[in-house]
Amino acid sequence: MKNWWKEALIFLVILSVFTLSLNWKFVREIMTSPSELFSSDGIITEYIVETGYQKIIRGENPYLSTNHVFYPFTVNYSLNDPGMGILPYYVLLRPIMSIHQAILTILLIHLFLAGIFMYLLLMNIGVSFFGSSIMALSFTYTPFVTERLMGHYTYVTSFVFPLMALLVVRFVRAKRITQKLIYAVLFGLALGWTLQLNFYYFLMLLLGLGLAVGWYLFTQSKQMWSWILMNGKYVLIAGVISTISLVPWLIGVRESLLVGNREVIEGFGRAINYSVELKQFLIPSENNPTYYSFRKILGVGREWEKTVYPGLILLATVAYFILRNKKIPFKVKRQIKPFLCGASIFAVFTLGPFLKIGGSIELARLEGVSIVLPLPFLLFHYIPGLESMMVPGRFAPAYLFFLSIAGAYLVDYIMQVNKLNKWKMMIVLLAVVGLDQSYRLPAPVEQPVPVSLYREIGVDNRNSVVLEIPFAVRDGLKYLGFVHAISPMQGVLIHDKPILGGYFARVNDEIFEYYKGLKVLGYILAITDRGNYDPLYEMPKDVKIYPYPYTAEETKRELDFLRVRHILIKTGESYTEAAQKIVRLSGGEIVSSQDGYEHYVRELNQVKEKMISLGTEHNDYLSGAGGSVVGTKYRTVVMPEAKLFFTGNGRSGNLVLEMSSTKKRMVEIYLNDHYVRSAWVMEREEYSIPNVSMKEGVNTIMLKIKTLEKDENLDEESGIRIYTIGERSPD
């Protein structure tokens, strides 16, 4: 123990060398250039964290909705796995760094923290300096985590596993009330922090704690019940502290659920596609230069969502445990078995809802009936709030964490039994970790980003929306438009104006339906769709540009309704000429160009009709989205919730809806995501909400039918009919 600080210093040096050498591209980018270039998936984290930061400095809740993407819809970050947990140190880095530099710095900090906390945990549970150092490095640079450096930044937070475990260990060992209280508070704060960093990790921690309690209740029932009775109050304190720390997030969740801002995923989403097969526990990362040729020989394709390879050292220790099990002392087995059990359970979770072999979940077929083997992950499909979990492979960090602890004990035992020189073996195993778990940071996909044009747009103080061609409406499952069009979201961070389209992990189906149904934007999305190809490995497919079928009046009307004043067009593309014609047809005139983009500006025409008739004669999808269908003279709400759009003048007035129903129904009315009144609807009449503030431009009305009977289905006959919607100025 006398040399603990020397050992700690040695480990810090080793960890620093690994972190800086493996991530030298990031280090160079942080030190030399305030890059405006983002990776495709990384833009989600960078956009959300930056907008959260901007809200904080304005004194606002970072989790509340915004309409800066997917205009005219509002979107909420709280259920989008945003990684808002990095804001405490992002706010310190952002004033002196660009967005991208700050995020890259935080990624390196997270890797460093993973190593430190894992080392401290292992040392605290009796593992030697040798075993702690090797397994801390192996856990830090496990391929699952390092592959997320390509864009899934919220998953480079694996440090939460050893951090939470370390707090539990210190709490259990604490003798004084003050010590227990401190660790309980820290645990509560850390648990709330984890939820704001990564929901998958939060869920895994809860499951891990549940498994630990279950293990000790099974093996040491009396002692465990006694411990629970003695320490229950501290557990309660931790829960209260965690809940308090999550108040901003909970407010955001309430808003998200209130306005129906959730994606409904039918079936199993991609859970089956993303299920891990048993062979993949032995297949190294595709980004590892050591195994590149080996993977090519095996014909293994890109499957980074299925990377669960633990590393040679862990595979070797597991093999040793199996082959030499009878000779391993009971004391060592007792140390190892709980962690091997935990690792096995979470490894099974990575296999998905059904066991998959050879790419198929069908194990056999008997008389035309498919035989499948259901697995524990299937339960998530039937738990409200967890049914949208669609990537079983993301449970890998928990299995790797438990396996690393078991491996650390085994490494120590092997060293003792074989009386090996620890410093020579340290060098050998460090070399193994370095070669076995090294990785290449991929070069970012080069996309011209018209920064000066974005700044030019930002100077315009008028309330307007930006259309960039190409753009995308995209989530983790589906897309419209050009799937790799991420620059519009970069633009928002510079010009601070709403944009059409966007890219989030979860996007409501109603947003896809709305954009698809728009005449002008639907056409643009179609002609810019070059397929969901991988830009690092594939070439885009050709898309046939069919004639534009709409008039100048229709084009202007749609863009005026959506308040599109600024339009950027990427030049040199197959769709460029068609896009230019549409923009000119709408009244757009080119004002500047930069980096292969042209900037057009058009004057907005004021919408003359305050009251909009919802029949087909006077509107299309401009005044409605989701949950309703168009009739001859009205729009019928056929879902429990429906959204409608109308144009406001930015002043207070009377909001008026003309509605009827074949059956008397209670309807809640929301204006721009805020409740304004309830009404019983039956006979055709006007329902007024006096003296409400309406936004300049598009306003959102949401109707919620509250008197539906169980299993009642709405249709065009039984739904709420809406004839007109709009505003009247106070008399």
Image (cartoon, helix red, strand yellow):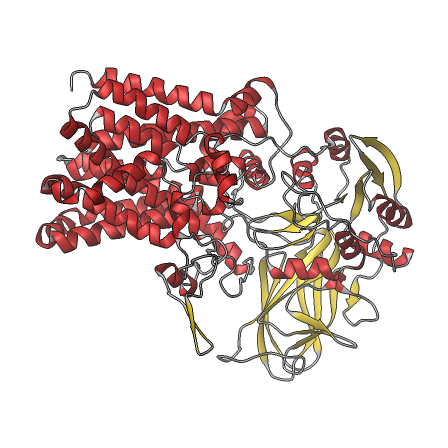
Residue drawn where x is 19% and y is 46% of the image: 337
The quarter of the displayed image where residue 453 is located: top right
Give the residue at x 29% y 41%. 403
Answer with left or right where residue 727 lies relative to residue 593: left
Q: Position of residue 145 (x, y in %)?
A: 43, 37
Give percent across and percent down for residue 359.
Answer: 48, 57
Could you say where residue 400 lies in the image, as x and y percent from the top left? 34, 41
Viewer-side residue, 443 vs 599: 443
Q: Exactly how many numbered labels are in the figure?
A: 0
Q: Residue furthest left?
A: 222
Relative horizontal placement of residue 191, taking residue 305 as reference (left or right) = left
Q: Nearer the viewer, residue 149 or 358?
A: 358
Say which quarter of the image contains residue 450: top right
Image quadrant occupied by the C terminus: bottom right
**Vertical order, 205 against 722 (above or below):** above
Nearest the camera: 631 or 447? Answer: 447
Q: Quadrant of the N terminus?
A: top left
Q: Quadrant of residue 673?
A: bottom right
Residue beneath the point at 35% across and 27% down: 432
Task: Identify whether 475 is placed above or below 295.
Answer: below
Is residue 126 at all visible to an observer of this figure? no
- Residue farthest along the front direction in this orientation: 297
Asked whether residue 315 is in view, the answer is yes
**Residue 47 sits above or below residue 345 on the image:** above
In the image, residue 579 lies at what x, y percent? 84, 47
Residue 717 as seen in the image, left or right of residue 259: right
Asked whether, in this view, residue 252 is left or right of residue 72, the answer is: left
